[in-house]
Amino acid sequence: MARKTIKLIAVLLTLALVAVACGGDSTSGPDETTDPDALKVIRFAFAPDPVWDYLVDSGIREQMEAEANIAILDSATWNEVGVYAGGNADIMSVGDFEVPTIVQEFGVESVIFGKYNIDRSILVASPDHPEYTTLEDCVGGKVAVWDTLSSTTIWGVLANELYGLDFRVDGGDFELVVVDHTNTVDQAASGDTDCALVLPDFAVPFLSTDAVKVLYDGKTSADLYAELVGKPGHEGPMINIFLARADWYESHPEEVAFFLELWETGVKAWTADRDQFVADYPEHFAVETDEQIAWIQDYVAEHDWFVSSVYLDQAWIDSEKELFGMLERAGLSETADPPTYDIVTP
């Protein structure tokens, strides 16, 4: 191992210990210093992800960090909100439609400055209901979902906007059954529920064998939303945006620019060779066999949920903001006011 790498690891380990010691201090981080040549640090909380693994395994992250004198202390976790709200992350990823609730409940003023993953959820029906074609057919029946927020919220908007229906846990026009996100499709396939919200990459064995019926001719929630706002091809709603603490964001423009540049590099690599990403990181797509890998490769080619660019532009923001009025109309938000978006120029 090169001495430069060993030195960088030692510095990062020291900074990690400092970060833990700093705990919930949201106004400062381990990179606060008067030395302009000191290593700058970004604390980042994010769920396991294939593009991030690629950036690490390829050495791109290490090279770009060394060139910029910026290091990312990443926390791989499924509880990004807890880490972020506790003051232990400067940046996290979450659905943009969840941001107003996070700001209100935790009092953390935040800024959306990048986008990453589009909501990819689809609706499927049990083989007991081959006649079903839309969510409206599921009225009064059981629907498997994986939580009360996330994609369930988006389908709550669609239910109200398309049919005037109430789609939520503990009430409404459906009986929503909350199970693990890996098991929603099994609930429908077995007939335990009439329908289910499904993440395609966690349901390949069922989708590839037609064990369930995919409704809306395979359209995702994002496809249906784009039709609602009259913007075919709109990348949204976003299940993963990049969110930063407002005070940190304003005082760390160099780190923000570097963060987006690094992720843009990863997204461009993904777009250039999706098949290789799936083959290299099958665990991120819940596939094992060659047949399953080939199926999800073909699916992603038609329904890519990764953005074409992490950078925001005003046209995208305007289309995405319409979601928040829909949330209020559906009774899923107390306000139609969207969160704060900020455009960073590449």
Image (cartoon, rainbow, N blue to C red):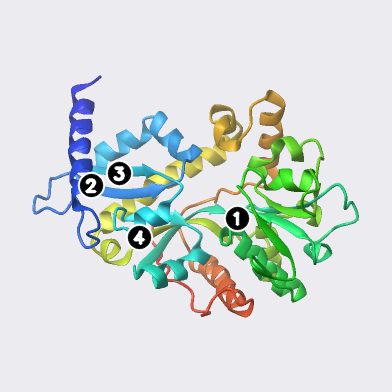
Q: Earlier in the sequence, mark 3 or mark 4?
A: 3
Q: Which residue is mark 1?
A: 119
Residue 8 in sight from this viewpoint: yes
Residue 214 vertical placement versus 228 (above, below): above
Amino acid type for the residue under numbered disc 2: Val
Q: Which mark is residue 72?
A: 3
Q: As rendered, which of 33 and 329 lies closer to the eye? A: 329
Q: Which residue is mark 4?
A: 85
Q: As rendered, which of 121 and 144 lies closer to the eye? A: 144
Discs 2/1, front: 2
Considering every residue shown, the one lying at the far right of the view is 131
Q: Earlier in the sequence, mark 3 or mark 2?
A: 2
Q: Earlier in the sequence, mark 4 or mark 1?
A: 4
Q: As rendered, which of 176 and 134 lies closer to the eye? A: 176
Q: Which residue does the image show at 23% across and 27% down from the upper left?
A: 5
Q: Secondary structure at mark 2?
A: helix
Q: Which mark is residue 20?
A: 2
Quarter-of-image position of residue 84: bottom left
Contact (Cβ within 8 Å) of mark 1 with mark 3: no
Q: CA distance from mark 3 to mark 2?
A: 15 Å
Residue 289 vertical placement versus 162 (above, below): above
